[in-house]
Amino acid sequence: MSFERPQYVPLKKRLEARVAAWTAAGLGREPVTLDEPGRAPIVAIAGKHYLNFSSNDSLGQAASETWRADVASCFARFPASGTASRLSGGRWRMAAEAEEAFARYFGYDECVFFPSGYQANLACITALLQSKQTVFADRRIHASMARALPLSKALIRTYAHADCGHLERRLCAAENEAGADNGDARPAAASRTDQGQPVVLSESLFSMDGSLLDIHAMAALKKRRGFFFIADEAHAVGVLGPDGRGLCAHLPGLADVAVGTFGKALGFFGAFLLLPQGFTAILEHLASALMHSTALPPAHAAAVLRLMRRLPGLEPQRARLRDISDYFRRELRAHGIPNHGRAHIVAIPVGNEAKTAQCGRILRENRVLALAARHPTTPHGQGLLRFSLTALHQKEHADYAVRALCACGLAE
């Protein structure tokens, strides 16, 4: 008995067709290859020098020779691999000490380190949320949270970007719906204890448009509605808040869980979750992203302990970053270029994806690197140019970038 082999469209051909469709819609991606590290914020591509506004090295720590020497000495002295997950291979005492030190510095009971912010958010969402748990997410929450949410099987509700008023209306509506479903004639506030505690997700400093969470409005709303608040502080840690502890640190107790990263302002790699008492054990039981990943190396923990000694002394860099960011925004306004953002992330709205990509190319032609953010990084039709300032940028760098933006025809 003979069988005819099925004729399939090759997988690669189908995938290439998808990429071609995205490219035709102005959504093509062309990552650059940088030459050997130069003197920040100048980078080299194919031997040509560019002014870099795409780096998240906000305080210039990754470029610091003293910090790089500290890291090198740690990796020379201690093992450079964790070799196994923390559950199967155990946790190094030095790693425990580093996590405890970070928890104390940021005002939390516990802390867990991860290889990346994406993995930290994946672990956080999939472990702390569960089926039928109601979660309210800002519509511009980071992609790592947005991609993790469906895996949690929680009841996902979104609210208008950075709009605490809309969030409260959605919270109240959910409470009323739950009361009605239970046949509860009591007011929603009275029946709230019968429901699972709702969870709210937001960034503190939004990574794309540079907007800031209204922490006072969120704190007042949390007091009224009693939700559990998870704040992604990846772009705020090291830069904002008292001693760089993050925006939410201005109001201790606001964020029940905070997500931070070493890979931006702190000039290292990896990420961390700041947690209430008892939550590490919850993650060790429920977070597959923690349970089934190789632990960070002892050398990483040693470097983090040295980083702890540097953090309190970074206020001069934070001040320089505030000054250059303010100057850049003032110059943009003076040249009629619209912009958003109140910290070191400055977004320049463009709109159409094709036009956004074209502006990115014009900037590149003028030797300026900045992110031309398009869907799915931003909503459809809301492309933007994202400039990430660092403490190493000077006024002449900002002036040069403004002139390059004028060449894009964005002035009103």
Image (spheres, grey):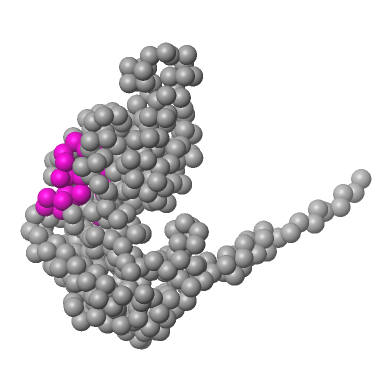
Residue 212 position within the rendered picture, expressed as x and y whole percent measured from the top left: 27, 53
Q: Residue at 15% across / 68% down in the picture?
A: 323
Q: Residue at 43% across / 19% down in the picture?
A: 179
In which image quadrant can residue 9 be found? bottom right
| 279 lies left or right of 409 | left
In the depicted view, which residue is nearer to us: 107 or 213?
213
Magenta-drawn stretch contains 250: yes
Magenta-drawn stretch contains 92: no
When the figure is inspected, residue 171 is found, relative to residue 335, above or below; the finding is above
Magenta stretch bounds: 241-262
Q: Residue at 19% across / 67% down in the picture?
A: 326
The N terminus is located in which quarter?
top right
The C terminus is located in which quarter?
bottom left
Q: Residue at 36% across / 77% down in the picture?
A: 411
Residue 61 position within the rendered picture, expressed as x and y whole percent measured from the top left: 19, 65
| 200 lies left or right of 17 | left
Count of picture labels? 0
In which image quadrant can residue 152 be found? top left
